[in-house]
Image (cartoon, rainbow, N blue to C red):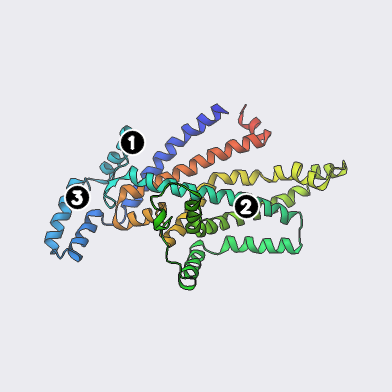
Amino acid sequence: MLRFLLVRIASAIPVLVILSVVTFAIIQAPPGDYADFIRSQLMNQGGASFAQADEQAQIYRREHGLDKPLVVQYFNWIGGIVTKGDFGYSMFYNKPVADVVGERLPRTLALALVCHLFASVLGIGFGIWAATRQYSWIDSLLSGISFLGMTVPRFLMALIIVYILVFQLNVSEIGSFYSPQYGGAPWSWAKFVDLVKHVWPVVAIATFGGLAYNMRVMRGNLLDTLNAQYVETARAKGLSGGAVVMRHAVPNALHPLVMYQGVVLPYMLTGEIETAIIFALPTVGPAIVGSMAVGDVYVTATFMMVLSATLIVGNIIADMLLALLDPRVRQQGGIH
């Protein structure tokens, strides 16, 4: 297993390098940079003439290396990461990119993992419940919920909840994790309850999409597995219905969902990102959108690389879980 893990990690390095090149090139493709943003700010808010604003923009561009060719900018950025762990300096936030990532990424990952836990437990449980009661009203109800979860856009659900909270329930504290009195307070049960009150829409919406997928896949796989010959043999031996389902059918029906774990974390991150943008929470989503809008390339590129890394790590974890679950995978891959 250790050899398998090392091989997968080694093979992931070239993928990350290629992704970094493509990501940096795509982000830099649109015309303009942060110096252009400064020029527009000086003209619109500072009352400067075009010539004065452009002169300041050119000075800023030279001081921060934005006038250098794209290839040079890329190697300066990637060289700083490899040699010094320096992800660059955020021009918009006026702090190192590592600080911006350190502030927002842990919150985003925590929300994504909570959503993943709820989506997996509830989705698999509802999928088993629906499959073992095929064509009943329970199956129809859960299938309808699954259909809605996979078809209704998450940003639309977020907009509906914002409308209800703000215009119908007169909730004013939107766009933060805590109420003002809990901002710098130490952890307590009251602070945790306040946190839940602020983030439950994000968790609910991101969970709903993952839950729908897990439930749909689990139901379909379990129905196929329940008709397999070895399941019929287990029934013929006199095993109870619960033992047949949980001990023989469910483990084999879980294989596609285990493979899905390779993309589930990025999926939950994007679900959180979409919803967090609507709610203006200080997480990864608003930072990516805000940095792209003003040309803060190092923030955008770093966050996109982080999302790419989570996809690679998720696939490695999924392969290892599948190898532990299925002896055939271990034999084919030479894993011991």
Q: Secondary structure at mark 3?
A: helix
The residue wearing badge 2 is 214
Crowding at mark 3 (Cα within 10 Å: few <14, some 14-19, many 20+) = some
Side (left or right) of 231 relative to 6:
right
Specify the amino acid type for callout 1. Answer: Gly
Residue located 52% across and 42% down the image: 314
**Which amino acid, mark 3?**
Arg
Q: Quadrant of the N terminus?
A: top right
Percent position of residue 22, x then y: 38, 46
Foreground tag (2 vs 3): 2
In the rendered image, which quarter is residue 37 located in? bottom left
Q: Which residue is mark 1?
A: 85
In this image, 259 relative to 186: left or right? right
Q: Compared to 156, does 184 lie above or below?
A: above
Q: Give the class, few, some or many, for how many residues have Cα within 10 Å of label 1's Cα (few <14, many ≥20).
A: few
Q: Residue at x 53, y 41 (%)?
A: 315
Q: How many marks?
A: 3
Q: Are marks 2 and 3 in contact (CB under 8 Å)?
A: no
Q: Amino acid at mark 2?
A: Asn
Of marks 2 and 1, which one's residue comes earlier in the chain? 1
Of residues 18 and 39, the one nearer the viewer is: 39
Q: Which SS class for mark 2? A: helix
Q: Earlier in the sequence, mark 3 or mark 1?
A: 3
Task: Name the residue that disc number 3 marks.
Answer: 61
